[in-house]
Image: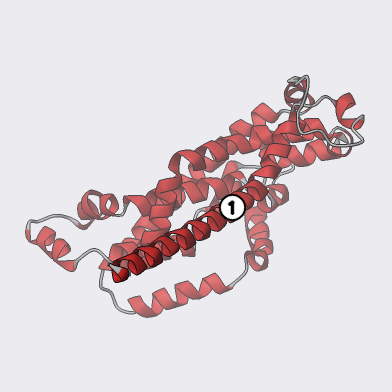
C-alpha cells in the first residue's frame, strides 16, 4: 500500500510539473504571437484613422473611433493604384508560370536523365547560389536595356524567370521517387514528358505548390528590379506605387493613407498564406527531409 501511495504521489507531482511547463510554453508562444501580429494590427488600425484624429493623438489609441474609409479612397485617386495592382498580377502570374516550366524541366533533367557531365553541371549550377543577386543586377540591367526591353513586361519578367534554389528543391523531390516507377513506365512505353506530368509532378505536388506560393510572394514584394527597369507609369507595379505615394508627400504627411495603401497591397498575400499555409509547410518539410 505504501509503494502504491508513493507512486501516486510521484505521478501527481509529475503531472503538476508537466502542467506548469505547458503553461509556460503557451504563455511564451502567446507573447511571441502578440509581438508578431501587433505590427499588422497597428497598420490596419492606422489605415482606418482620419488624418486629423491621427495627428491629434498625443498618446496612441488602440481603437479607431469612428473608423473611416476615406484613406482607401484617397490612395486610389491620388495614384493609379488599381492599374498598378493589375500590372503586378500580370507580372506575378507570367513570371511564376515561366519559372514553374523552367524549374520542372530542369529538375527532371538533373534528377532522372543520364547524360555526360550531369553531376558536374549540377555542381556548377548550385555554385550560382553563392553569387548575391546584387552582383548580377547591373549586368541584367545592361542586357535588358541593350535588347530594348526597358519599360516592358518582358524586361520585368525574364531576369526572374529562373531560380537555382527552386530547381534544387524540386530536383531533390524528384530524386526521392523510386527508380522502379520510371523503368516500369518506360517498359509500358511511356514517354519522359508524360511520366513527368502524370507521375512525378503529382507525387511532388506539395513542393510544386510551395514553389508557386513563394514565387508569387517574391514577385508581389519585388522592389529593386521594377524600380530600376521601369520609369513609365504604364508598367509600374505596387512597389512603384508605394514609392510614388512617398514622393507625393503622402507617406511623410498622411500616414493613415500610406497605411491604407500598404493594407490594400498586403491583403492578397496574407489571404494567400492563410489559405495555403499547410501546403507551404508540407512542401518545405518535404524538400528538407528528402533526397
Residue, x 57% and y 53% (percent of image)? 29
Residue, x 88% and y 39% (percent of image)? 252
Relative to 90, residue 177 above or below = below
- Residue with the most extreme left position: 188
Residue, x 7% and y 61% (percent of image)? 187
Viewer-nearest residue: 136 or 151: 136
Q: Residue 276 location in percent, x, y?
A: 44, 42
Q: Considering the image in quadrants, where does the C terminus appear?
A: bottom left
Viewer-nearest residue: 47 or 231: 47
- Displayed quadrant of residue 231: top right
Would residue 235 appear left or right of 63 to someone viewing this image? Answer: left
The reply to whether residue 148 is visible in this rendering is no
The reply to whether residue 139 is visible in this rendering is yes
Q: Check disc 1 and report its element: helix, strand or loop.
A: helix
Would residue 230 appear left or right of 120 to someone viewing this image? Answer: right
Q: Residue 34 location in percent, x, y?
A: 64, 46
- Displayed quadrant of residue 232: top right
Relative to 172, residue 249 above or below = above
Residue, x 67% and y 38% (percent of image)? 238
Write down the residue under mark 1. Answer: 27
Viewer-nearest residue: 118 or 286: 286
Q: Residue 130 location in percent, x, y?
A: 56, 74
Amino acid at each position: 500500500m505504501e509503494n502504491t501511495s508513493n507512486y501516486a504521489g510521484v505521478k501527481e507531482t509529475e503531472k503538476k510539473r508537466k502542467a506548469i511547463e505547458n503553461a509556460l510554453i503557451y504563455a511564451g508562444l502567446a507573447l511571441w504571437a502578440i509581438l508578431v501580429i501587433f505590427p499588422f494590427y497597428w497598420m490596419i488600425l492606422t489605415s482606418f484613422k482620419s488624418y486629423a484624429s491621427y495627428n491629434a493623438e498625443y498618446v496612441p489609441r488602440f481603437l479607431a473611433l469612428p473608423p473611416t474609409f476615406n484613406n482607401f479612397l484617397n490612395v486610389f485617386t491620388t495614384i493609379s493604384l488599381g492599374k498598378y495592382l493589375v500590372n503586378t498580377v500580370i507580372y506575378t502570374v507570367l513570371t511564376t508560370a515561366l519559372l514553374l516550366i523552367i524549374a520542372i524541366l530542369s529538375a527532371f533533367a538533373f534528377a532522372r536523365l543520364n547524360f555526360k557531365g550531369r553531376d558536374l553541371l549540377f555542381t556548377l549550377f548550385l555554385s550560382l547560389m553563392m553569387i548575391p543577386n546584387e552582383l548580377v543586377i547591373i549586368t541584367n540591367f545592361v542586357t535588358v536595356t541593350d535588347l530594348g526591353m526597358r519599360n516592358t513586361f518582358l524586361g520585368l519578367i525574364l531576369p526572374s524567370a529562373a531560380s537555382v534554389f527552386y530547381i534544387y528543391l524540386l530536383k531533390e523531390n524528384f530524386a526521392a521517387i523510386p527508380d522502379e516507377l520510371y523503368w516500369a513506365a518506360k517498359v509500358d512505353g511511356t514517354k519522359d514528358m508524360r511520366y513527368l506530368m502524370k507521375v512525378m509532378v503529382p507525387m511532388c505536388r506539395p513542393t510544386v505548390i510551395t514553389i508557386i506560393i513563394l514565387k508569387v510572394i517574391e514577385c508581389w514584394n519585388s522592389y529593386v528590379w521594377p524600380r530600376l527597369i521601369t520609369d513609365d507609369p504604364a508598367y509600374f507595379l505596387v512597389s512603384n506605387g508605394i514609392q510614388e505615394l512617398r514622393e507625393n508627400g503622402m507617406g511623410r504627411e498622411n500616414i493613415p493613407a500610406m497605411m491604407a495603401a500598404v493594407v490594400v497591397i498586403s491583403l492578397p498575400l496574407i489571404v494567400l498564406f492563410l489559405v495555403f499555409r499547410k501546403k507551404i509547410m508540407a512542401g518545405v518539410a518535404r524538400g528538407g527531409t528528402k533526397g
